[in-house]
Image (spheres, coloured by chain):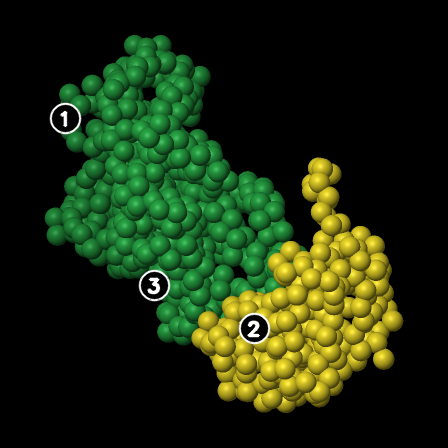
Chain colours: A green, B yellow
Amino acid sequence: MKKSFYPKLAITNIRKNARTVVPFIITCILTIMMFFMMSSLCQNTGLNSMESGSQSLIVVLQLGTIVIGIFSVIFLFYTYSFLMKRRKKEFGLYNILGMDKKHIAKVISFETLFIGVFSMIVGLLGGVLFNKLIYMALIKLMHFNASFDFQLTSEPVVNTVILFTIIFILMLLNTLRQVHVSKPIELLRGGNTGEKEPKTKWVLAIVGLLCLGCGYYISLTTINPLQAMMLFFVAVILVIIGTYCLFTAGSIAILKLLRKNKNYYYKTKNFVSVSGMIYRMKQNAVGLANICILATMVLVMLSSTVSLYIGSEEVLNKMYPYDCSITTQGTVSDDIYNTKLKIANKALRDNNVTSSEPYRVRELGAYGVRSNNSFESKDLTDAYSADCAAIIVMPVSDYNNINGTNAALNDDQVLTYSSKTGYTGDTFTIDNTTFNVKEKLTHFEEISYLASQMMDTTYVIVKDISIFNQITGNNNTNGEVVIPDDKLKQYNMEQVFSFNMDGATTEEVNAVQKQIYNDYMDLDCGGYLSFKETSKADFYTIYGGLFFVGIFLGTLFIMATVLIIYYKQISEGYDDKERFKIMQKVGMSKHEIKKSINSQVLVVFFLPLIVAIIHIAFAFPVITRLLSVLALTNTVLYIICTIVSIVIFAVIYAIVYALTSKVYYKIVE
Amino acid sequence: MAILEVNNLKKIYTTRFGGNQVQALSNVTFSVNGGEFVAIMGESGSGKTTLLNILASLDKPTSGEVMLNNKNIVSIKEKDIAKFRRDNLGFVFQDFNLLDTFSLKDNIFLPLVLSGKSPKEMDDRIKPISDKLEISSLLEKFPYEVSGGQKQRAAVARALITNPQLILADEPTGALDSRAADHLLNMFEDINNNGQTILMVTHSIKAASSAKRVLFIKDGAVFHQIYKASMTNEEMYQKISDTLTLIATGGER
């Protein structure tokens, strides 16, 4: 009997505290399940043996596992300590009833053991059960039709058990430490020691405001995608700091200002709410800021990964306008072109594949500075600075070839197209050569999509390639088009040969690609090849993987948000219970009390969501720019994905609100 | 003139599933005149708290009526009760019941805010009351920053500020040390001498002896009463304690 006393007591305790313990256990189970599934995906030999993009996918998955691992530690630790705080009184009572701290420690240890073992078993079982499903979902997302053998290895199980055993031991040690250092009376009093009124920290509030302002400003004003990539993280960190400062200091500063305004403050509606909120914010500001940042992260992650995934076909077509292209640099000679043509034709013939007319693009490119209608080239090594612009010069014949037009130009005439900013005037100057602009094009099939997204690119279409010599200042007499030696650092010339294979099956396309690749590499004449079909597989692997991890982490974060909110509501319920009893005694009607509770709970609940949505609204410009680096320019798609994510999140949030406020009212009444 | 009349008050508690019935008040009848200071004494379980809850309109009697200024508070509709309570009654509790989120001043203002008074009027009203209760210098402080006696005086101020018909005090000295208790009782006497009607429930003979009349409740009915008349507090104390002994030893009245 004596032996089984502590375990029995532990079980009774768990049962008695079901209201708080059960959600915690469920969270443990789900977290364990997720971690297990993610780490077993990483170890999956099927994915490892995949042909294309498998390495990057594994890296994405591994990163996902690490994030889940770190997050589980923080999250479970946080919720557990929260759980224990509520139970201090119980421990105090045990202590007074004659249980040693050693005995209490024993009970707590048993409780943690039971919770840990139970959730570990259920979590792992659930993980194994759903693993296959998740695996199939991932395969499906990545557009693989081959199904791999699915096998269970022991490594993920061991990893999961080790990680979560450590987490549970840490939680236990922390609780034991708390019980150990406290005095019985303190334990008995538990949470309700006299709360001091928070001080107004103006400095912190202003710092928060500045940080947030800077973060927003960066997002709104950074036009250059390259800069955006670098500044994005700065902005994220600024906004996070700003959010914490504003939730902790800013909220209290505002509430205190409201309190100073007598005509506003001394109204039934505001009186109780404002003063209540000051204390609520003191206790909950950090938690609310956490929720807010989590929510923002979930929404940004979901909306961007989903829109990348949905938009991947479109992105692919933009980045690879042709099924196959071969690029050589440094020369635009016909010899090279004819060699390529021969190789391609042979491959097509051998595989019985018909192709479109080949496209030929010869271009002269340069980086430099453009001011209105004149461009001055700079050293290529200086490229990728913030105000860098680019020009691409091509002959009108190639232009007609791609665009299906038949424009004709004189020696001094050009057509131009600007990817970002236009210019004024009827002439365009490249270094020392000035051209008359015949037409400013409004539509253009871009050939170098990425470059033109990254920087301000102007396409200049000239009469023929002899103009290249004129621009580069090449005055050799044999008529060969080359860049003079002293300008090699400033200009770059390349020739692209591309064609489409319409109506060919994937197998045929792959065979052609393989042959062209081998034949071309045998020539050893430099340059590079790009195949749409190969890239497509890579695309789906990476974007599918990102999408998968996005949804996975999104679910985890939502779960975290829900649980934090739930605990917040419960603990506040207990705190508010007394307060509202008093108010009823001094003449506040039930209706008034309910109204006041409602307004406070609503604010506390929806403030993080609203701030998260504001964050996202301000992050919108910079994220669209980042996505454009990844060639996703379909802003409408991104907007739709964002709105759908917000709506789904808000609905889940509202459901959680409805459920938890029910519990809250039950406690208060 | 009777400000409060309690007639044949009866309260029976029924356990949730209708099993046992407990009679908390069997038949209580008494009245309080304007300007009186009445103490109600009785042992634990005698029905004091039930009586006070009914007078405070926090609870409904099974039968009987409670007339406050000739208005039966038993029949007031649920939605008007809160307003009635804050306009006509002032409360002082054993454990102060001050809200820790409010400064003392805001705690005192609470009932006024609820009745929609202007900030100016509130400021006008608090001045004389806080002076009288000697808490003027503490108004900006928070409950956790002041002593028990000071908290209770703030609670008294909160009860007084609405100029209620009747102040209901539930063991007001219960959580105070003897000096603070004496101070508070002196103030109660002062307030009463200024015309305020007070009804106080208490265990403490000391507290009861400052009242002008003491009612004894036993087994849910008024058992006996003593008028102070011209007695000093000490004589009153003696008389109350004799009566209690009598009740405890089961003697006839």
Mark on residue A371? 3
Q: Residue beneath label 2, please?
A: B173
Q: Are marks 1 and 3 on the same chain?
A: yes
How many numbered dots are placed on residues in this image?
3
Q: Disc 3 residue type? A: Ser
Label 2 chain ID: B
Q: CA distance from mark 1 to mark 3?
A: 40 Å
Give coordinates of residue A191: x percent, y percent.
43, 56
The answer to which of marks 1 and 3 sits earlier in the sequence is: 3
Q: Residue furthest left?
A: A485
Q: Disc 2 residue type? A: Thr
Evaluate whether residue A520 shows in this view.
yes
Evaluate whether residue A356 shows in this view.
no
**Of A642 and B211, which appears nearest the observer?**
B211
Q: Disc 1 residue type? A: Asp
Q: Nearer the viewer, mark 3 or mark 2?
A: 2
Mark on residue A24? none
Q: Residue at x 71, y 40 (%)?
A: B20
Q: CA distance from mark 3 to mark 2?
A: 86 Å
Q: Residue at x 37, y 70 (%)?
A: A204
Tags 3 and 2 touching, CB below 8 Å: no
Q: Are marks 3 and 2 on the same chain?
A: no
On screen, residue A60 versus residue A596, left or right, reads left
Give coordinates of residue A296: x percent, y percent.
44, 49
Give coordinates of residue A232: x percent, y percent.
34, 54
Tags 1 and 2 touching, CB below 8 Å: no
Q: CA distance from mark 1 to mark 2?
A: 102 Å
Q: Is residue A182 above or below residue A647?
A: below
Give coordinates of residue A663: x percent, y percent.
58, 45
Q: Residue at x 16, y 48 (%)?
A: A488
**Of B3 and B138, which appears nearest the observer?**
B3
